[in-house]
Image (spheres, coloured by chain):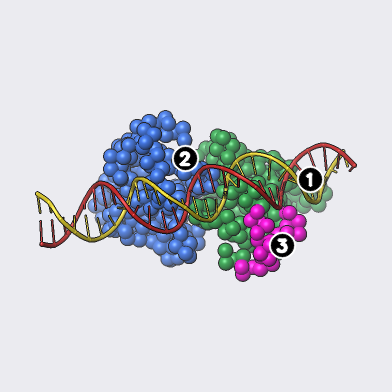
Chain colours: A green, B blue, C red, D yellow
Amino acid sequence: MNHRPDSASATMRAVGPLAADPACRRCEVRHLAFCAALDSTQLNELHAIVEHKQFKAGETPLMEGDEAGYVFNLVTGAAKLYKLLPDGRCQITGFLLPGDFFGVAHDSHYSYSAETLMDVELCRFPRRKLELLFDRYPKLEKRLLGIVSHELSLAQDQMLLLGRRTAIEKVGSFLLDLSRRAKRLGWPANPIHLPMSRQDIADFLGLTIETVSRTFTTLKSDGIIALPKTSEVEVRDLSRLEML
Amino acid sequence: MNHRPDSASATMRAVGPLAADPACRRCEVRHLAFCAALDSTQLNELHAIVEHKQFKAGETPLMEGDEAGYVFNLVTGAAKLYKLLPDGRCQITGFLLPGDFFGVAHDSHYSYSAETLMDVELCRFPRRKLELLFDRYPKLEKRLLGIVSHELSLAQDQMLLLGRRTAIEKVGSFLLDLSRRAKRLGWPANPIHLPMSRQDIADFLGLTIETVSRTFTTLKSDGIIALPKTSEVEVRDLSRLEML
DNA sequence: CGATGCCTTGACCAACCTCAAGTGGCGTGG
DNA sequence: CCACGCCACTTGAGGTTGGTCAAGGCATCG
């Protein structure tokens, strides 16, 4: 049911229904995730309905138009959420890192797709079962409301970025954002690791891959960043990056 | 306040101070608003905490950074929600029409501003009191979750528009969207009335006022729309408008 | 070591922006 | 009732940002 079905957890599971689920308790992203701030009872009930799943890089845990039967919590890895136009143009609406929640739909079908950027572990909650839990633990529903409100706020920030910022401002704010999120996860905040391709960055910022590449080059020759690897950005002048 | 959730609502309605509040019951946008689909008891309780307010055109019911003490429901008129960059660049994140809800903040302060486009009537709910109601009527909180999820979905659509659509596609989709919303409100869907200025449309679509104006002119000379007044758009070829 | 895929760079182009002037509707005052 | 001014909108000319198309570099992997 969760993680690897190996010896340690099998032993603990023998004790009793409530002591039997160390997986969620041990979860490294729990303090960041949907399941944060739950008491023992709630956590156990949540654990009872969760399904741990793994995906390889490039797979799609959910697709626009699918029946919205589950909500998800990313545990390890990274993914993107995106929408497509009929002619193939793509807008990435967000990147998912450990602890991030996704899959909320305002009606019965998802309005966007998700694709993994690398191998991913996630928790999957059947929507119906979760809603039953909400009736007993309104706190869970409050938590979800908080998460969705937060995402709405991020979406509005992104609208401002897409509609009114220049290419260099877009890239700068993207890098700062990734750096902050890495820090929150306890990862190195300065050599920023980019789990996504240049094309993904372009589709997130409303630019082309060439413009993203050129903007990185500009920032590099201005001494604001360095690019030790193509998937790694070192911030060399934070204040000038923030000024953009 | 004197109602208990488990009382028979039919009986309760007959007597007491709450029988004296037909305002909410008569509300013309109730079937569209936050207060839709509530039973009599819930509606009475909600009515007990609501404050009706009026604003003149150009006023700001809430500003980015203000203490988020209230949530709002627009009853009549129209308004815009927007965010500003330090240098004054503006992105409108949405237009509000009767029945629309706004003022949800993910933390204790608003992350955007609201300004009326014309004289407006609205309902204002004190956030703390509303949250107390949520504890007794989880259905209210579910309703709010539904509204916020829906707004998130709209925000993602708007990201796709801002990042990946051309000027003419932006204007076309804006007009279709306004037309659909008018229809839902029981207003004429075809000569579309625009309650906002060209500048507002530009700030919504991530364009300049000149580009919006030119795009209207192009659509007009292509015979797709007519402009009987500057604030009125007549759709003359719906299918070609939808094709954009 | 060649093939592959991603990224970078270059030259050119077009969509959209900027700046500036012109138009038209509307309210005000003579 | 008309003249005027105001303001929002439209139109025009020219510039810039970012897009398009194409070639070249570079790392990874068989």
Q: Are marks 2 and 3 on the same chain?
A: no
Q: Are marks 1 and 3 on the same chain?
A: yes
Q: Is residue B143 left or right of residue B233?
A: right
Give the image location of residue D1, x and y in percent: 9, 49
Q: Is residue C28 left or right of residue B178?
A: left
Of B85 and B79, nearer the camera is B85
**Which residues, given as a range, are shown in magenta?**
A214-240
- Name the residue tied to disc 3: A226
Q: Amino acid at mark 3?
A: Ala
Which dot, 1 or 3, sits closer to the camera? 3
Q: Amino acid at mark 1?
A: Pro
- Name the residue tied to disc 2: B169
How far is disc 1 from disc 3 in space, using C-alphas? 43 Å
Q: Are marks 1 and 2 on the same chain?
A: no
Chain of the residue that carries numbered disc 3 in the rendered image? A
The quadrant holding residue B29 is top left
Residue sitting at x 81%, y 52%: A8
How far is disc 1 from disc 2 in space, using C-alphas? 52 Å
